[in-house]
Amino acid sequence: MPPSSLRVVYAFAREMHPKTTDVFIEYGTAGFRTKANLLEHVVYRMGLLAVLRSRCKNGRTIGLMITASHNLEPDNGVKLIDPDGEMLEQSWEEIATRLANVSDNDLESTTGEIIKQVNADMALKASVYIGMDTRYTSPRLAAAAVHGVIALKGTPKEFGIVTTPILHFCVKCRNDNTYGTPTEEGYYEKIVGAFKNIRQKLPVYGAYSTTLHVDGANGVGGKKLNIIRKSLDGELDLVLFNLGGNGGKLNLNCGADFVKVSQKPPVGMELTPLQRVASLDGDGDRLVYFYMDEDCKNMHLLDGDRIATLLASFIMDQLKACGARDLRIGLVQTAYANGASTRYITDDLKIPVTCVKTGVKHLHHAALSYDVGVYFEANGHGTVVYSDTAKSVIRKIALDGDAEERKAAELLLNFIDMTNETVGDAISDLFMVETVLCARGHDARHWYNTYKDLPCRQLKVTVEDRNAISTADAERQCTSPAGLQARIDELSSAYDSGRAFLSSAYDSGRAFVRPSGTEDVVRVYAEADSQHSADKLAAEVAQAVYDMAGGVGDRPTVSE
Ligand code: 16G
Ligand code: MG
């Protein structure tokens, strides 16, 4: 394409998607995210960028998802998906930020400069898959994305309302047809089909019940489960709540993030004692479980750490049963992982653990270094990835092994098919959890009792500039402002960890701080041997952040 045709980029932008704000916006942990009315020009420009990315990848398909995940309804966001269904390569985040922030007048020249910088061959075809969540602002933003793609002569394909993981799956399938069919139906066929295959062979026994209550966060994930529900042939009886009707607002006092952070059950649900409940987030890429005790007073949370340990232990058992002992299984967590889960995984399951920075891309990347990499953030985002070697070893055993080995290998192959390996996926994760619980004849209490979580608390503090906080060692150490880490150490050492059995290094409470990638706040996490101590330590550390890193507004308090 000759440079003169870039003029259309400018004309489209000025006439249809003008930049109406000077507020600087950054491609953060999960793309751009802010108030929906500040995003139209950003999404248009991401349409442009997706085309360039596709051309740099030899015309392979790129994804563009409109969502603000677990944020409330007035927000929205956009993120790009790379050809293998993974998050956009980090080096392009800066380019995305630059393109999103230039003035309309400079858009044409900046686009030209970026084309040169990334060496995009404008003669190549380009393909962009576009999906959106259920927000009322999403269709307008999706239209802006389509315009951006067309302005640079790419081919957009719209998927309408889908979960984020469904779009990741379709992008992967489009670029690698051995993975599946790049449609929503193709996703159901593979993931739900594999679940039904396994479950038809598993007897329902013990304490496991096929009834599962689901909190859909009034978002897209619940709606998709409502479609799936009808095809489950009684293998799982889904009772769905918070599907977006009856005035229920997206993510408001419900959904995985609310349940995890507030440690409270969602509104809009019938709470039944001991009933297993799965809670999804607004775009269907996070999952946590919980149940209420006998008198429906206390909630017991089964978060991403619990899902990770459940899946890892099951997969490890199957690998042993099929004799694939050489395959290396590993687990990836972040600093938010409950210390008790890390101890259980390392000491009891004897599975190696890697700790990385927050954000799916970091976990995903680290998990790829194992033959079987299980990764989960405590907030419920995670999946399992299998190396090509792992898949071929298991396939071979399914053909050549003895009867017992073949059985385990076949189960594992179905388990792999049920997994959305591209990204954390609430629907796929839910089917995996249900499979493991069913195979073990366990209810939520058995699962909960595998180990005891340490009480923890999260808080947020507003400061003048959250980037004044920098961290190292997978966010477990704060390197600036000077003196803050020493203060955190001093505060933590006044508490017991409940982990004294490990070594003296674990005697104290634990706390860390990090700037959020999605909100203009500093996050604080604390863990200690009692809820009271965890709350107190979190409040003290939050106060230290407020005092030493330029706190603004109200002083931090324990309740979020
Ligand atoms: C985004 C990330 C999630 C991370 C969260 C942290 C993706 C797809 N999602 O939701 O992994 O846990 O941000 O948010 O990467 P924070 O930086 O505001 O704490
Ligand atoms: Mg999400």
Image (cartoon, grey):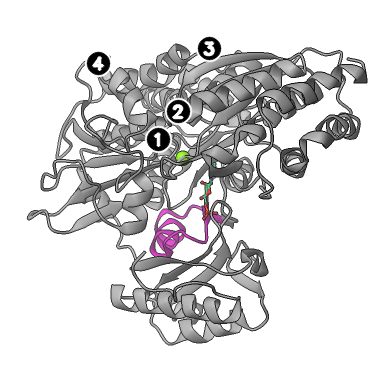
Q: Is residue 346 magenta?
A: yes
User: 240 and 173: which one is in front?
Assistant: 240
Mark sitting on residue 230: 4
> Label 2 amino acid?
Thr
Q: Disc 1, ligand 2: is the CB inside 8 Å?
A: no
- Whether 358 is drawn above or below 473: the answer is above
Residue named by callout 3: 181
Mark 4–mark 3 Cα distance, whole angstroms, equals 21 Å
Q: Residues within 10 Å of mark 1 (few under 14, many from 20)?
A: many
Q: Secondary structure at mark 4?
A: loop
Total count of labels: 4
129 left or right of 6 in image: left
Q: Residue furthest left?
A: 295
Whole-percent x, y for residue 265 in the image: 23, 50
Q: Is residue 35 magenta?
A: no
Mark 1 — residue?
426
**Viewer-closest of 200 and 162:** 162
Residue sitting at x 48%, y 18%: 160
- Cα separation, mark 1 vs mark 3, equals 20 Å
| Amino acid tagged 1 | Ala
Q: Which comes sooner in the sequence, label 1 or label 3? A: 3
